[in-house]
Amino acid sequence: MAAIDTISPAQDPRLPEPYVVKRVDQDTPDTFSLTLHPEGSVKPIPFRPGQFSMLWVFGVGELPISISGDASEPNKLVYTVRSVGKATHALVSRGAGDQVGVRGPFGVGWPMETARGRDVVIVAGGIGLAPLRPVIYEVLGNREQYGRLVILYGARSPRDVIYRKELSAWARQRETQVLTTVDYGGLSWHGHVGVVTTLFRYARLHPSRSIAMICGPEIMMRFVTRELETLGLNRDDIYVSMERNMKCGEGFCGHCQYGAHFICKDGPVFPYQKIRPLLDKYEL
Amino acid sequence: METLERIIAEHPFFADLEPAYTALLTGCASNVRFSPGTYIFREGQEANHFYLLRSGKIALETLTGRSSPITVETLEEGDVLGWSWLVPPYVCNFHARALQETRAIALDGKCLRGKCEQNHDLGYEFLKRFAQIMVRRLHATRFQLLDVYAAR
Amino acid sequence: MARLKQKNDAPQVLEARLLPTLLETLSRHGYDVIGPTVRDGAIVLDHIQSPEQLPAGWTDEQTAGHYRLKSREDRAFFGYAVGPDSWKKYLHPAELMLWSAQKQNGDFRILNNAGEPGRPFALFGVRACDLAAIAKQDRVMMGDQYRNPPYASRRENAFIVAVQCTKSAETCFCASLQTGPRAAGGFDLCLTEMTDARGHCFVVRTGSKRGVELLSELDTTAATDEQQRLEADLVEAAARSQKRAVQTEGLKKFLEDNFDHEGWQKLAARCLTCGNCTMVCPTCFCTTVEDSSNLAGTHAERWRRWDSCFTLSFSYIHGGSIRSSTHARYRQWLTHKFSTWIDQFGSLGCVGCGRCITWCPVGIDVTESIRTLREGNSHGNP
């Protein structure tokens, strides 16, 4: 069943394939989107929304990064990276023409098959919108196959809002509601201010026909899942994307264990029902 | 007056309120309108009113002392603005500024405090509704304080 | 052919003086023989070129945090229990280069040049607990969604000569986990050593076609009923002598229900988070990768190294380590072995070899830990 949302690496998953940076777009002061194209004889790798790759910078190291581009354009891999450490800094410092090694795609993605015919509610926090952007592309690109699209997005402050232009463009699509909020606003911000859960009271959603997909910091997902349950969404209809330190992507290195789950191959996307008992365990 | 009563009855904050109470409230209510940029109340000012928002958007702002004011919350249609009138010393804690053309029902807090003192059933009904909102906002505030998207 | 068939069916007896012939035969068949030998005051595993390297006449004394070699009165080759090494040292090497890369004119090229094994291994002297451990690692490395090529290439052609234990160490608890001391399968040949006044020999059983073929090249006789009875008795006695045990019934559920058990902190109070238990554990499979490059930035390598869930870096994600306290890391290790491994791979992750008990510098005993937890105040446990 989960296999539908999974595509396994075509080549040896241990060996990075050379890709070339085509462009780098700055989303916020510390967040950048890299567009990569396969180099030479490298075949483009299809992926499912929610899957991730291991990105390698020569001489620096490797990082798990969710694919944030359009799954219908597999010859173009887009990654949105926040520069918070040495490796992420090296990654976002790549320029057009530079090479990046790519392994993957890995993991189980969002349940797009299950979402067919239903309202799709996306709740994202911070850079958590990145792994959900392929879902938005998929829904908007196949509009008749899905019900309403509700996007609830929370960022720290107005300057931390990623995909700002796209958010406005999505808001203009039919059957689509986009609400963006920031934890702290300034004089020039005329949008919502308040944590992402405060958006629910303005969202037009039908709990019984909705499927919710959440990505953000773990604390944020805990708050959001509780709110969704209060609204009447079925636990089986809520999906979350988890993060641990994936090293191999194949369930061998053991680093990403979360209870009995290997986030890299059993996730990163999990049905909320499946991991609900684990979410409030401290130091699991 | 009849339309005012209906507006109050239909506002989510007063959903399913006993009609007798709604009539009582209407006596303390008035229709108000704020153009963008108008301050509805300011921090430190005596808190005499609360507002049932019908349309538009209000920002709750505070001064950080360092730069321009920051907005800690926005409120919109269906929300309630202001509860400082309910508890002593009846002083506003934030600036409330209209971000858009905003329509609201203003309720006279002083008048209501008197009515609640006379009719404890009404008072209890009132407190229950405000308590819900206050708890929800307290949770949201804690979530906000966690600053979950900060780079660590 | 008749002789071959006979050997397939019935256990044989190999005289101890012919053990060198068995080693020679394995070498002649192209195997790189790995077996026990004495080094640095312990019985470790190494390449065996000559039978003199085997620890004949040695035994060990093991308790929690304690290991000493002692000499035996006889010349038994296998009169000791497992040492600090396990066979994962060869099947799942502690350090392995996965690939290297060259950079020229700004472009890199990955060279698929992982360190490949040379000749196939003959693992000589694999105890029942370690057979079980190899089966568990097989499941992890070759029986799941992905296949681990470095493991598979070492494992698939390996010839396994098992040895049934006739002596348990004080730290052994395989009997309680039904992983030993009897070797039930997973070997090509299985030896049981007998040494007494009547002589010194091995009862040899075969577990594969390869085993049958190899054994047919050796000079053996059919084992008598008495010899077979003695074989069973010796192994049974080794089982009975085990003092440590893990009560597995209900343990998985108990650990699931007792994540917040107050006992974890007490148990971990002595833990130094050194990771010794994970290094000596024959089933622990966790690794990390390290990337390095030369100063000129023209050559890069990726190395895979054993890692331990007892390190802080193991659970590090942006913002800090998930399991920052010692008790959380001890709980992760123990819970993985006795609970979540079952969810992941369908069996326990522990084989009862007792290495983690012996090699813990402060003598933390996993069997005692489990008993203490279950006897203490708990949820979901009557």
Image: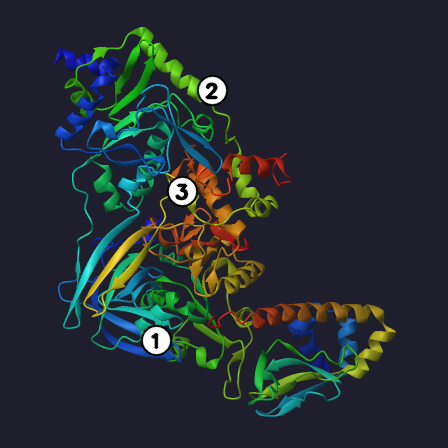
State which chain disc 2 sits on. Answer: C
> Mark 1 packing: few (<14 Cα in 10 Å), some, or many (20+)?
many
Q: Nearer the viewer, residue C367 or C317?
A: C367
State which chain disc 1 sits on. Answer: A
Q: Nearer the viewer, residue B102 or A6?
A: A6
SS at badge 3:
helix
Q: Which of marks 2 and 1 is in front?
A: 2
Q: Distance between the residues labelled 2 and 3?
A: 31 Å
Asked if residue C255 is positioned above or below residue B17 in the image, the reply reads above
Can residue C260 be seen in this snapshot? no
* Residue B23 image point, x, y percent: 77, 77
Same subunit, labels 2 and 3: the answer reads yes
SS at badge 2:
helix
What residue type is disc 2 on?
Arg
Can residue C101 be seen in this snapshot? yes
Find residue C197 and name its label: none
* Residue C140 image point, x, y percent: 33, 42
Tag 2 residue: C240
What residue type is disc 3 on?
Gln
Tag 1 residue: A32
Tag 3 residue: C344
Asked if residue C24 is positioned above or below residue A99 in the image, the reply reads above
Is residue C224 shown left or right of residue B97? Answer: left
